[in-house]
Amino acid sequence: MKRCFQTKQYEFTYSENHVDSYVLWDNHCHARYEMIAVLEGDISIMLEGRCCRLTEDQYIIIPPLLYHAVTANKQGDYKRVTAFFDIQAVPSVLREEFTQNDAQPAIYSSSLIKDIRICCQEEKAAYYEPLIESLMIPLFYNSLKAPAAGIGDTEVDQFILKLIKYIDDNLCKRITLEDLARYTARSKSFICHRFREIMGIPPGQYVLQKKMAFAQKMIQEGHPPTLVASQIGYKNYGTFYRMYIQHFRSAPSLKQASGASV
């Protein structure tokens, strides 16, 4: 079962399902913030070389452009809430401190997740919109406190983190496998093998997904698509246009709803 609840600032989804396959969501990234909350079940999230585990009443807020995959740690019944939102949904007095946590996402606990689920199950979206949006505010405050559980350094692959940092720092340039080999002083074959082993995807595909998510984010913020294409290293707008449609199944346009997500 899946129920969607959309407000002016959020896209909520409440899901109930019996899990037989351990992979819930393959590797991907989004142009918006994503909250993943567990009501029942046990999941692991791989966040660009780091691994964290969520169980009942725990949630994590994943910042834009952070590559991640979600797997179930056991078979059985799962209940979860996800929410997509932009930084404007966070109260202005919290935004600076809130964005400082982007570099180190952590796990938090709150019983308010159950109340958000109840709102998602209601039919009158307009009636419950003020309530469900107000329930998100305490979660933001909670995320500025000491986390319930951090993401252990023992799970971090330093070589992959080095590659990811280089890619993030150079998203507005053309990035080739030769560039990664030169930067790390490792062979191209080693990089491909290691990256696929840890991230589950070839480095070239990772760079492409990151660039497309970054482009979508910039377009949603009001930047012209032709300018965005050149800013992420595409000299030919036609090539960018085709890749964008392939990823999002819609053309890059300033008329896109801000709620669009990867």
Image: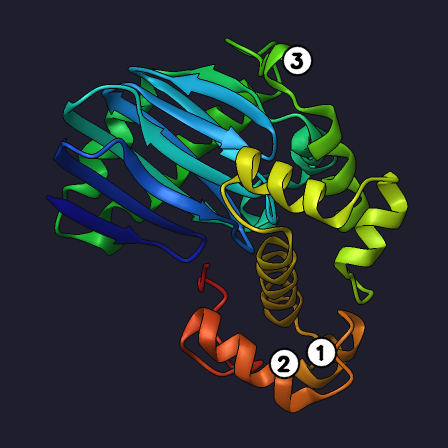
Who's the residue at 80% across and 49% down the image? 180
| Whether residue 119 can be seen here | yes
Circle 1 SS class: helix
Circle 2 SS class: helix
Q: Look at the numbered discs 1 and 3 and tell me whether their residues touch, using CB distance below 8 Å.
A: no
Comes first in the chain, label 1 or label 3 = 3
Circle 3 SS class: helix
Alpha carbons under labels 1 and 3: distance apart: 36 Å
Question: Which amino acid, by three-letter code, is at mark 1?
Answer: Ala
Residue 9 in the image: above or below residue 196: below
Disc on res. 77: none
Expressed as whole percent of the image width and height from the top left, the position of residue 44 reads 40, 24
Residue 63 in the image: above or below residue 144: below
Q: Name the residue under label 2.
A: 240
Q: Which colour scheme is used?
A: rainbow
Q: Mark 3 points at which residue?
A: 153
Q: Mark 1 points at which residue?
A: 229
Alpha carbons under labels 3 and 2: distance apart: 37 Å
